[in-house]
């Protein structure tokens, strides 16, 4: 399905999010270590990009979800973003980095497979 033009920039960002999520999830959750400088730099870059992406999604999607009465999707978006922000704040250690990777992957796939298609079906009604 071709994306609605308004959603294209958000959908394009998802590829980078999934690459980072896969990388982050490969760190064993039971290890305790502080990130080395290379890992810390990658986390910092992803944190900056993801936080901006979340703000853009919330500004664009939340009003539409509210108007369309998609309260479950709106709640999940807020809940996932809050959890991802919290994990990003702790991502310089293996356990939260692993959890971040898993949640980011699940969240991004939910948006691509469920949220965006549902919104596109009703986009003009909002």
Image: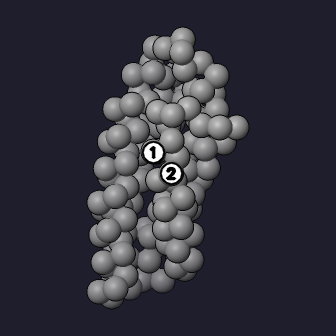
Question: SS of the residue at dot 2?
Answer: helix
Q: Quadrant of the N terminus?
A: top right
Q: Residues within 10 Å of mark 1 (few under 14, many from 20)?
A: few
Q: Is residue 122 visible?
A: yes
Estimate the x, y position of residue 74 in percent, counting from the top left. 48, 29
Residue 82 can be seen in this image: no
Query: How many numbered badges does the structure rendering display?
Result: 2
Tell me if 46 is positioned left or right of 75 in this view. left
The quarter holding residue 124 reads top right
Pinpoint residue 82: horizontal percent, then vertical percent.
Answer: 38, 45
**Residue, disc 1:** 9
Residue at 52% across, 79% down: 27
Q: Bin the neighbour count of mark 2 within 10 Å (Cα to Cα): few under 14, some 14-19, many 20 and up.
A: few
Regarding mark 1 in the picture, which secondary structure is present there? helix
Left or right placement of residue 14 versus residue 36 in this view: right
The disc at residue 12 is 2
The relative height of residue 33 versus residue 7 in the rendered view (above or below) is: below
Residue 41 location in percent, x, y?
30, 78
Residue drawn at 31 percent across, 50 percent down: 52
Identified at 47% across, 33% down, the residue is: 6
Contact, CB < 8 Å: mark 1 with mark 2? yes
Q: Is residue 76 above or below residue 53?
A: above
The answer to which of 67 and 14 lies nearer the viewer is 14
Residue 50 location (% of width, % of height): 37, 55
């Amino acid at each position: 399905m071709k994306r609605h033009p308004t959603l294209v920039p958000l959908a394009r960002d998802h590829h980078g999010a999934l690459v980072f999520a896969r990388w982050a999830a490969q760190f064993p959750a039971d290890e305790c270590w502080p990130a080395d400088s290379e890992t810390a730099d990658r986390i910092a870059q992803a944190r900056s990009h993801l936080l901006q992406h979340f703000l853009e999604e919330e500004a664009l999607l939340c009003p539409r979800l509210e108007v369309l009465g998609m309260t479950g999707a709106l709640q999940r978006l807020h809940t996932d973003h809050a959890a991802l922000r919290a994990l990003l704040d702790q991502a310089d250690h293996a356990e939260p980095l692993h959890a971040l990777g898993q949640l980011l992957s699940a969240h991004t796939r939910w948006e691509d497979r469920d949220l965006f298609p549902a919104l596109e079906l009703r986009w003009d009604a909002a």
